[in-house]
Image (tube, rainbow, N blue to C red):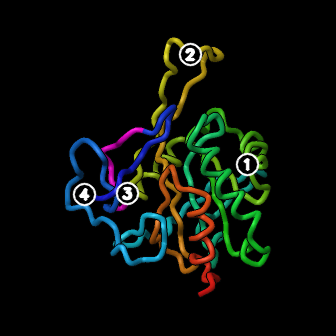
Amino acid sequence: MGSPLLLAGRRAFASGFLLAGALAACSGPEADGASRGRAPARDPLRGIVLAEPIDKPDFRLTDTEGEPFDFRAETDGHVTLLFFGYTHCPDVCPVHMGGIAAVLRDMGWQARDQIRVVFVTTDPERDTPERIRVWLDRFDARFIGLTGSRAEIDSIQRALNLPASVVQPLPENEARPEGAYLVGHAAQVIAFGADGPARVVYPFGTRQADWAHDLPRLIGTAGG
């Protein structure tokens, strides 16, 4: 069986979906067809290397300036880290964004300029462009934030074989503002190469040391 496709909510939980047929759930029935699993262990990357690449999706959403953003065109020629999450996320989203930002700060500007980080909200009802911008700026002002209708965002996730986000009510014993809720969503960062396809994904729990190891290799600047 392949590696787990995790969903993020209050805690990460297992799903029965596959990511491009390569990431199987840790529980529940497998999707139709065999999981394609990881590439051979000799691959030097520390992320989950896909046996078959994922094509870069062609979609258009709205950026934090309120302008249309053509994902494929705007990220062409760059290593692109794509993540679906939301600004009220208590755990997975800030950990992923913080880890990536910390590693990018330690890279030279020429290397950083070859990488795009794109955050797509899974909570468009609460995540306005302004809120997304303020939240992303806590990590790195260069991070790109996108929003759209829930139907548009769900369609993009389906195209990547990701589960659609799921609104989760808070436990009754939690003191939160009335109307507050959590959103379950896929917990991987998908890394698209400068040539387009994604060949590796990074699950929740990826360490900063792993990002520091892999990002130079993804852009082809690692020594040795």
**Where residue 152 appears, x then y in whole percent?**
52, 48
Which circle, 3 or 4, is nearer the viewer? 4
- Asked if disc 2 and disc 4 are in contact, CB closer than 8 Å, the reply is no
In the image, is residue 136 part of the stretch drawn in magenta? no
- The residue carrying mark 3 is 19
Question: What's drawn in magenta, residue-wise?
Answer: 13-20
x 61%, y 58%: residue: 208
x 61%, y 72%: residue: 79
**Where residue 54 appears, x then y in whole percent?**
42, 68
Amino acid residing under circle 2: Glu
Q: For mark 1, does the 10 Å Cα neighbourhood hold few (<14), some (14 to 19), or many (20 or more) residues?
A: many
Q: CA distance from mark 2 to mark 4?
A: 36 Å
Q: Toward the viewer: 154 or 215?
A: 215
Q: For mark 2, does the 10 Å Cα neighbourhood hold few (<14), some (14 to 19), or many (20 or more) residues?
A: few
**Where residue 173 appears, x then y in whole percent?**
52, 12
Q: Specify the label residue 1 is tagged with.
A: 4
Q: CA distance from mark 3 to mark 4?
A: 13 Å
Amino acid residing under circle 3: Leu
Q: For mark 4, does the 10 Å Cα neighbourhood hold few (<14), some (14 to 19), or many (20 or more) residues?
A: some
**Where residue 16 appears, x then y in whole percent?**
30, 45
Q: Secondary structure at mark 1?
A: helix
- The residue carrying mark 2 is 174
- Horizontal side of 114 relative to 60 (left or right) equals right
- The residue carrying mark 1 is 136
